[in-house]
């Protein structure tokens, strides 16, 4: 895996300079220097770094690519886009997103009442807002309030009951109004076409949302009967998140385009937009032969524009405006999770760990001789001998013929022989050697929670690009599995011989080693769970000024222990009193000891749940 696959997933957002990975923008600072600067301010746990310039890049690329496709095909409709808030609702993200998108008339998509409030307060007047998902009367009423405030808002009908509610709310808001104002109306259609992979169920007849053809005709008649047909503005569909294959989209576009044209010809004169939903995929793979997306953004845009134009021409209707609600594509690349390695659990398998005796059991002496005489020519033979000796020695231990020191020496020597053999035979593509890497993998304990920061790995086995911040001028050799600090066996990114990750051999007692997890900006924060009560990591926004220098802004530290408990509705005042009372009333402590314990207790309660490295503890002393 050359350069950790940076040329596959990196999209030229990051570059390797010397031995560090750097931001490919402005002054090109290294992620290591930014991390160290934040840690010098006292933040020792995992860090989430946000880069607003990458949001702007994605938005700009999306709009420019569709504009180029429109010009190439002489397409008459407009292109518009909104960001679905379900992908990331965190304030630092939303504020940065709206700040960098001012020049694109970029809006927001909401799927709940709380998200509508965010959209109403953060979207500039005139920029589009779309509202999806199941709605009650209050939620629909919020859409009407937004429209009367001057927002360009479209409420999408997910079922006929919602349309009945829209008709009722419209009557309540506009019956006595001097100037009736209502939101635009969209209809989500249930296509025959479906996506593929994990999110395939977002489309097709069995999908959760959308109107069937029969319901669509009934909705059309209801809108016409209640004089709301002039508000019918948008056809909406969605075939799934992380759409890796372009073929299902083409099929869905043909189906949705013909529905749009049919409604136009029936008399839905105000109908003027088709919303593709989300699904524009991100390339997460670090391996050339395991890529997740088979199309480019240019192909995506060209297919959409060409098919919509072709259907419109054949049906004799106006070309619709094209909407997208791509969230993953916009947000994923903007954030990087950086976490320090706390410990390597396989470091005991070194020559320093051997406890050889003056006289060793014959098989252990043979293992030692095999290790010292191992060569390229006889590596495979000696490897097989070592594995055979180990089985025999473990049997001897079970029968009581060798002791614990002998067993330890066996494990260490066989591990060393496997390592040395793999290094000598590295040019051989052997299944046997790949399987053996599972036995010698180094286990890196990393100061983060996979459940909090990478929930899609735990829930969907979604892999994220991982690489160290430095030492990139040195080839890593350790097959690596990554353990988080939760007490859950699922909190592990295990070594995968089909998607191998190699990291450097380090001594955590004398040096720091940071791992970066990339493309974490979509869904990971909002889906993160407080497993073991680990919370959202400390975050910072990295901005660049006109001279190209970076600033670290909007630092928000991870919640402290008492705030976490307060969020779970514990009575933290009572807990505080109980802790204090139990110390003050202890008969085993004198007054000085009580004061010292209380001081330490309140210091620790003010900290977050993440661990501190040995170096950090030493610095405090």
Image: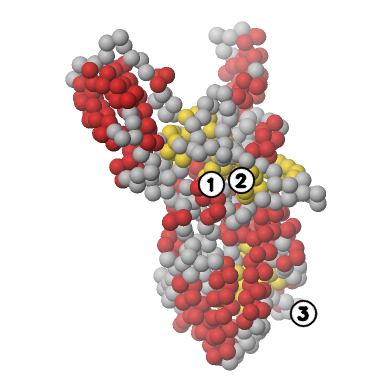
Q: How is the image coloured?
A: secondary structure
Side (left or right) of 123 relative to 412: right
Between circles 3 and 2, the one closer to the viewer is 2
- Between 507 and 471, which is closer to the camera in this rendering? 471
Q: Are marks 3 and 1 in contact (CB under 8 Å)?
A: no
Q: Are marks 2 and 1 in contact (CB under 8 Å)?
A: yes
Q: Residues within 10 Å of mark 2 (few under 14, many from 20)?
A: some
Which residue is depicted at the point 70% across and 51% down? 25
- Between 376 and 590, which is closer to the camera in this rendering? 376
| SS assignment at label 2 | strand
Residue that sits furthest to the right in the current view: 546
Estimate the spatial distance between the alpha carbons at disc 2 and disc 1, rounded to whole Å: 8 Å
Estimate the spatial distance between the alpha carbons at disc 3 and disc 1, rounded to whole Å: 62 Å
Task: State the residue position of label 1.
Answer: 3
Side (left or right) of 245 relative to 162: left
- Between 221 and 1, which is closer to the camera in this rendering? 1
x and y, in percent, of residue 301 in the image: 58, 72
- Mark 2 or 1 closer to N-term? 1
Q: Residues within 10 Å of mark 1 (few under 14, many from 20)?
A: some
Task: State the residue position of label 3.
Answer: 179
Which residue is depicted at the point 51% across and 69% down? 238
- Mark 3 or 2 closer to N-term? 2
x and y, in percent, of residue 458 in the image: 45, 47
Which residue is depicted at the point 60% across and 39% down? 19
- Mark 3 or 1 closer to N-term? 1
Task: State the residue position of label 2.
Answer: 16
**Residue 590 visible to an observer of this rendering:** yes
- Between 195 and 371, which is closer to the camera in this rendering? 371
Which corner quadrant holds the C terminus? top right
**Residue 82 visible to an observer of this rendering:** no
Which residue is depicted at the point 57% across and 18% down? 582
């Amino acid at each position: 895996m050359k350069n950790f696959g940076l040329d596959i997933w990196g999209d030229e957002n990051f570059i390797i300079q010397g031995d560090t990975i750097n931001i490919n923008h402005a002054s090109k600072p290294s992620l290591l220097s930014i991390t160290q600067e934040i840690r010098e301010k006292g933040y020792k746990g995992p860090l989430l770094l946000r880069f607003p310039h990458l949001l702007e890049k994605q938005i700009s690329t999306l709009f420019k690519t569709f504009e180029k496709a429109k010009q190439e095909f002489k397409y008459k409709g407009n292109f518009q886009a909104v960001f679905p808030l379900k992908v990331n609702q965190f304030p630092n993200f939303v504020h940065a997103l709206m700040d960098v998108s001012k020049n694109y008339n970029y809006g927001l998509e909401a799927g709940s009442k709380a998200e509508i409030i965010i959209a109403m307060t953060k979207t500039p007047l005139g920029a589009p807002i779309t509202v999806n998902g199941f709605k009650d009367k209050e939620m629909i009423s919020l859409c009407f309030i937004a429209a009367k405030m001057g927002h360009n808002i479209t409420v999408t009908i997910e079922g006929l009951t919602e349309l009945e509610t829209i008709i009722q709310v419209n009557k309540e808001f506009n019956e006595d109004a001097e100037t009736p104002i209502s939101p635009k109306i969209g209809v989500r259609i249930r296509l025959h076409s479906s996506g593929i992979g994990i999110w395939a169920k977002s489309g097709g007849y069995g999908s959760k949302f959308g109107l069937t053809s029969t319901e669509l005709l009934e909705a059309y008649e209801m809108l016409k009967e209640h004089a709301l047909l002039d508000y019918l503005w948008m056809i909406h569909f969605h075939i799934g998140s992380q759409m890796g294959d372009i073929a299902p989209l083409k099929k869905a576009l043909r189906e949705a385009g013909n529905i749009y044209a049919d409604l136009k010809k029936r008399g839905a004169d105000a109908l003027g937009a088709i919303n593709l939903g989300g699904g524009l995929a991100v390339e997460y793979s670090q391996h050339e032969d395991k890529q997740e997306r088979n199309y480019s953004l240019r192909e995506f845009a060209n297919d959409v524009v060409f098919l919509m134009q072709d259907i419109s021409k054949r049906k004799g209707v106006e070309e619709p405006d094209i909407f997208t609600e791509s969230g993953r594509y916009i947000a994923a690349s903007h954030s990087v999770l950086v976490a320090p390695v706390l410990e390597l659990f396989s470091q005991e398998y070194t020559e320093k760990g051997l406890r050889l005796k003056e006289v060793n059991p014959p098989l252990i002496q043979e293992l030692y001789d095999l290790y010292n005489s191992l060569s390229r020519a006889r590596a495979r033979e000696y490897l097989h001998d070592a594995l055979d000796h180990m089985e025999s020695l473990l049997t001897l231990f079970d029968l009581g013929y060798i002791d614990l020191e002998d067993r330890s020496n066996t494990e260490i020597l066989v591990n060393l022989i496997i390592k040395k053999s793999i290094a000598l035979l590295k040019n051989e593509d052997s299944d046997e050697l790949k399987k053996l890497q599972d036995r010698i993998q180094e286990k890196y304990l990393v100061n983060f929670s996979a459940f909090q920061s990478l929930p899609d790995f735990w829930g969907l086995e979604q892999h994220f690009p991982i690489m160290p911040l430095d030492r990139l001028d040195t080839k890593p050799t350790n097959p690596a599995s990554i353990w988080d600090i939760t007490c859950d066996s699922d909190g592990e990114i295990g070594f995968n011989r089909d998607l191998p990750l190699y990291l450097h051999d380090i001594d955590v007692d004398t040096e720091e080693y940071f791992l970066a997890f990339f493309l974490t900006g979509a869904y990971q924060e909002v889906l993160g769970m407080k497993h073991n009560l680990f919370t959202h990591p400390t975050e910072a926004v990295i901005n660049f000024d006109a001279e190209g220098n970076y600033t670290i802004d909007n630092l928000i530290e991870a919640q402290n222990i008492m705030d976490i408990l307060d969020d779970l509705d514990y009575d933290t005042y009572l807990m505080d009193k109980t802790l204090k009372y139990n110390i003050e009333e202890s008969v085993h402590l004198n007054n000085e000891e009580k004061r010292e314990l209380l001081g330490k207790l309140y210091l620790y309660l003010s900290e977050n749940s993440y661990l501190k490295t040995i170096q950090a503890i030493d610095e405090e002393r």
